[in-house]
Image (cartoon, helix red, strand yellow):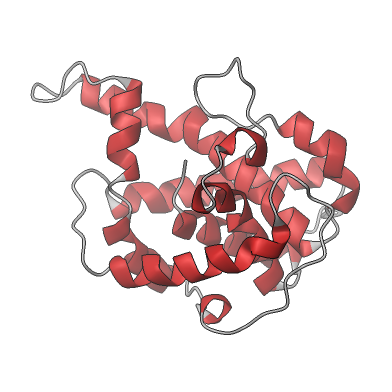
Amino acid sequence: MASAVIHLCVAKEVNKYLKMDENMLLLGSIAPDLAKQINQTKEISHFLDHTNEDDIPNIDLFLAKYKAELTNPFEMGYFIHLLTDKYWFRDYVYMYLDRFSKSKTKKGITYTALRDLIYNDYTNLNIDLIDKYNLSLDLFANEIELPKSKITEIPVEKLGILIEKMGLIIIESKKEKTFIFDTKDIEEFIEKTVKYIVKDVQILGVLDNKGE
């Protein structure tokens, strides 16, 4: 899946069209990853179809339960997270898989192996992305009132655990080195994904075509 900081960047850019409460939207945009912090699998939190090996969320399952809640920033942020993962696994991971398949030194790498490699390659990018997209970190430094959400796939009352973890991720980002990603590639992914998501939300009638 895309990193938490990538999710925050996408959500902030989409919010230029939505103009919702930013802190609640950003919190929603990382909320599905709470499952990992409390030792739960992501099948439920990410609305995964058990027949899909690519970890692409089943967006229709989410909309069937929560479409009416998308006027709330937390739920919209959650939706943005799922859509970002959809485009990440549908487009981005396979772009890298194709690139690696043409490399003489890395030829034959499997999807699973590449996915695991990618998961270990986020941290050095985070600070660059935080600066590029002018992400405010107040959400992870100050106490905030947790949302009253109808989403049952995660224990919303435990979101404080995720907020604390994000603060640690940002600190750790300064210590690591990246060896796969190019920042320009990630920025291109964010730009394209924002356009896709704005269109997705427009189709649902939430934006009222403000993003056009």
Task: Relative to 212, say whether 43 is above or below.
Answer: above
- Residue 206, given in percent of the width and then of the height, sits at 85, 52
Q: Residue 22 falls in which quadrant of the image?
A: bottom right
Q: Residue at x 31, y 54 (%)?
A: 183
Front residue of this view, candidates 202 and 153: 153
Front residue of this view, candidates 79 and 48: 48
Task: Relative to 38, say whether 50 is above or below.
Answer: above
Horizontal relation, residue 75 to residue 6: left or right: right
Horizontal relation, residue 69 to residue 109: left or right: right
The residue sitting at the front extreme is: 39
Front residue of this view, candidates 128 and 68: 68
Horizontal relation, residue 200 to residue 173: left or right: right
Residue 211 seen by the camera: no
- Residue 34, given in percent of the width and then of the height, sits at 57, 53
Q: Residue at x 30, y 23 (%)?
A: 98
Horizontal relation, residue 39 to residue 188: left or right: right
- Residue 85, given in percent of the width and then of the height, sits at 55, 40
The residue sitting at the right extreme is: 68
Q: Residue at x 61, y 59 (%)?
A: 11
Task: Relative to 50, say whether 95 is above or below.
Answer: below
Q: Residue 138 falls in which quadrant of the image?
A: bottom right
Q: Residue at x 63, y 29 (%)?
A: 48
- Residue 13, given in percent of the width and then of the height, sits at 59, 62
Residue 10 seen by the camera: yes
